[in-house]
Image: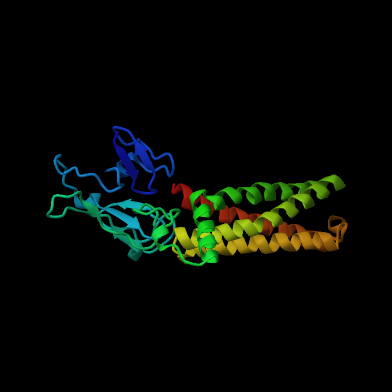
């Protein structure tokens, strides 16, 4: 049975034909390439190949792995916001020994390239136990997508907490205020895992790129973390904050809305990086 690799995310499909759409990243079936058992592009030199026009060139963003088709790379990557100089043309080069054509190596992020960032090269494993343990943690975080999984907890609980605060103000029910406080405590407890895995993801999957979108996402995440921590401390110091003066209560609500807005911004950018729509 033939094997096909997605040129965007590296997903391997087995079948006589590539899938119409990649089940992992949603890329079109045209970006799949036939590979052999070792994972190298299969030798298809015996079959007639159509000549690609200039407009059919494929360009890969070395930061996020986005594939652009056209005569020239885009000025700005629509996924991660990297500049035109971050793109490299995906070129198939046939050697003189009639071996399988090799693709031009890609620098930067390994998304869509020959090496998945979640895979560890054991031949280059560090000698110390601590370094190997750190490498193993990074491997597991990347392999099992711990960051997008863990971020669902605060992203799901945080809006409920803000909703309970607003309902508590309107209804005067103390139970809603208590529920909001416990939900916010849960958010704060999960944030260290979210921030740590997010940092690992950014450094290893996106090569620590500091484009405008990454700066905005990092800034929004820090706003959420600081705001949530202040809100919990505020509640501990003044449990009856929603029964305080209008100015104090208004400042507390505005802080919650700021936190919610930052979480939405971070989530939208994260979704763009994952789904690339």
Q: Is residue 176 left or right of residue 218?
A: right
In this orientation, which residue lies closer to the viewer: 169 or 122?
A: 122
As drawn, 182 above or below 211: above
Q: Residue at x 62, y 64 (%)?
A: 222
Q: Residue at x 20, y 53 (%)?
A: 54
Rendered-image quadrant of the N terminus:
top left
In this orientation, which residue lies closer to the viewer: 227 or 12?
A: 12
As drawn, 127 above or below 17: below
Q: How many marks are shown on the rendered structure?
A: 0
Q: Residue at x 49, y 53 (%)?
A: 142
Q: Position of residue 121 (x, y in %)?
A: 40, 58
Q: Is residue 213 visible?
A: no
Q: Is residue 276 visible?
A: yes
Q: Is residue 155 left or right of residue 43?
A: right
In this orientation, which residue lies closer to the viewer: 154 or 143?
A: 143
Say which quarter of the image contains residue 243: bottom right
Q: Is residue 113 left or right of residue 220?
A: left
């Amino acid at each position: 049975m033939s094997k096909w690799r997605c040129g965007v995310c590296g997903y391997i499909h087995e079948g006589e034909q590539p899938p119409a759409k990649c089940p992992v990243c949603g890329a079109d079936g045209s970006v799949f390439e036939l590979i052999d058992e070792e994972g190298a592009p299969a030798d298809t030199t015996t079959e007639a190949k159509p000549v690609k026009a200039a407009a059919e060139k494929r360009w890969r963003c070395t930061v996020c792995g986005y594939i652009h088709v056209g005569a020239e790379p885009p000025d700005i990557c629509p996924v991660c916001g990297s500049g035109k100089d971050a793109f490299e043309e995906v070129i198939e080069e046939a050697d003189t020994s009639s071996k399988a054509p090799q693709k031009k190596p890609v620098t930067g992020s390994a998304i869509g390239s020959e090496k998945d960032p979640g895979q560890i090269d054991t031949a280059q494993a560090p000698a110390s136990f601590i370094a190997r343990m750190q490498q193993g943690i990074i491997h597991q975080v990347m392999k099992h997508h711990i960051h997008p999984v863990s971020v669902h907890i605060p992203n799901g609980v945080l809006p409920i907490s803000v909703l309970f605060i607003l309902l508590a103000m309107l209804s005067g029910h103390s139970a809603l205020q208590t529920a909001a406080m416990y939900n916010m405590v849960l958010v704060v407890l999960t944030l260290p895992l979210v921030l740590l895995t997010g940092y690992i993801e950014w450094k290893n999957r996106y090569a620590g790129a500091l484009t405008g979108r990454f700066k905005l996402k990092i800034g929004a995440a820090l706003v959420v973390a600081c705001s949530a921590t202040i809100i919990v401390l505020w509640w501990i110091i003044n449990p009856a904050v929603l029964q305080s003066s209008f100015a104090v209560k208004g400042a507390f609500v505005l802080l919650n809305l700021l936190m919610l807005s930052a979480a939405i911004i971070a989530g939208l950018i994260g979704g763009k990086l994952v789904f690339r729509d």
